[in-house]
Image (cartoon, grey):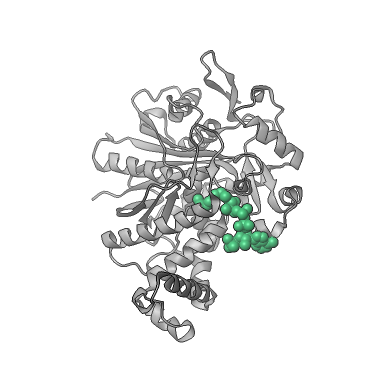
Amino acid sequence: MTAVGIDGIEIRTGKLQLDLAETFAPAQDEDPGKYTEGLGLHASSFPDVYEDIVTMGANAAHRLMERKGLTPADIGRIDVATESAFDNSKPVSTYIAGCLEQVYDDNFHHANKGERKFACISGTQSLDDAYNWIRAGRNRGRKALVIATDTALYARDDPGEATQGAGAVAMLVDEDPGLVELSTEQGFGSADETDFLKPNQQFPSVDGKRSMKVYLARMREALEDFESAAGDTHPNDYELVPFHTPFPGMVRKAAALGYRHVVRDTDVEISIAEEIGRQPRREEYKSQEQYFDAVKEYTDALTETERYQAWYADAIEPTLEIAREVGNWYTGSVHVARVAGLKQALEHDRAMAEKKLLVASYGSGAQAEIHAETVVSGWKEEIAALNIDEQLDRRHDISFEEYERIHDVHNHDTENDADAEELITPTQEFVFDGWGRMGERKYRYVR
Ligand code: COA
């Protein structure tokens, strides 16, 4: 069977950064430790006044196409995953295709375009759609462009304001991929939940604490389902485990739960039993509550073991390095985690070809999905081609007053965003260019 997977990835961050410990925490009268230690975040990315989900997505896709020597005729489908869409009918992929057509001679008239919605998991669902399209033999040799793009903004003074972010990830899905091959096995954990939603409103209604519980519950279900399809998992099977990362502190909790689940009944459980005992089993406890207390106690002890900490340092920590600097990118977040892990592997000369990743996606509402990927031999060139470090270094560090203004500019209820004063002069990129006669957003390429 021909390998199908991700051939190349580009990341585009919003061009502004809000320092959470230095700028945001003091203004909110909070301890910086909540951000740096508790949530595990240093900064959030924000879009400058001329950036939005279309410009970030188009700029990421443009760099990817240029790097891969592609023109629109090579692309058979464009799927955009977002939970920040500003149009309930016309998909963001049409706006992005319109941008790209400004800089290419040919067009995307024969590409199937769409938009996927399921909170943060829709980026992974779009990858699935692209994979299935190629596997079904409907691609006629063409490639799919999957773009996950979001401005993850919360209402001012909502607790979620601590975890904001803005950026896009563009992925090229193709046969004989250059980065990772996707597995056929998947596991799902899905239930009708009310933890995070935007019923016809821009900023989310969030029950933050509940969303964290739902994340863990659905992830556990997805892992069980994955094992029923792919067989039992073992921590040694996977070199990196990129999780959906709304903030690194969430992944700290999810990783402990996942590890506990995966090592149950394995040599690992036996070898650490001398130190912390065996894992609690439900049948050993009279009530559910006693069992949960015992599980919590065991998990706390587990995360203190050298064995767990070594695994966490190798398999999880590298995947969080970009998220700490950019915050939550919703649909792009798990894909940023994959890139961060591979980037760190490249920097530390880790051998990754033929190694496996276990990718754990999540979207509120709620659904988790787990699948495996195999890193392929071209991975180093793909990761070395990224310019995310330069983009992060070039970000403008905003003051709290600038943050307040930028948040207002991106609030759909305010009207003056086309004339708002920019903080970084745009160059060689797509920018928002005001409104059209039917209320559509317009874009142009700045040379
Ligand atoms: N030093 C170290 N850690 C600190 C601290 C300090 N000074 N102050 C707080 N913390 C820790 C807290 O103990 C907590 O960690 P824990 O959960 O391991 O106990 C963490 O920092 C966050 O603090 P908390 O008081 O719980 O923050 P909050 O009430 O403002 O809410 C969220 C945090 C994540 C619920 C909120 O930001 C939110 O709603 N986010 C959006 C929804 C989301 O991202 N959900 C995730 C699933 S998709």
Left or right? Give the position of 177 relative to 104: left
Q: Could you tell me residue 68's position as x and y percent?
A: 44, 39
Left or right? Give the position of 249 relative to 25: left
Using the image, determine if residue 330 lies above or below residue 267: above
Q: In the depicted view, which residue is nearer to us: 393 or 238?
A: 238
Quadrant containing the C terminus in the rendered view: top right
Q: Which residue lies furthest to the bottom in this view?
A: 274
Q: In the depicted view, which residue is nearer to us: 326 or 368?
A: 368
Tally of marks: 0
Using the image, determine if residue 81 lies above or below residue 286: above
Using the image, determine if residue 148 lies above or below residue 367: above
Residue at image location 27% in from the left, 34% down from the top: 140
Left or right? Give the position of 197 relative to 128: right
Q: Could you tell me residue 185's position as x and y percent?
A: 29, 55
Q: In which quarter of the image is residue 427?
A: top right
Q: Quadrant of ligand 1?
A: bottom right
Is residue 131 visible to us here?
A: yes
Q: Could you tell me residue 276's position as x and y percent?
A: 48, 82
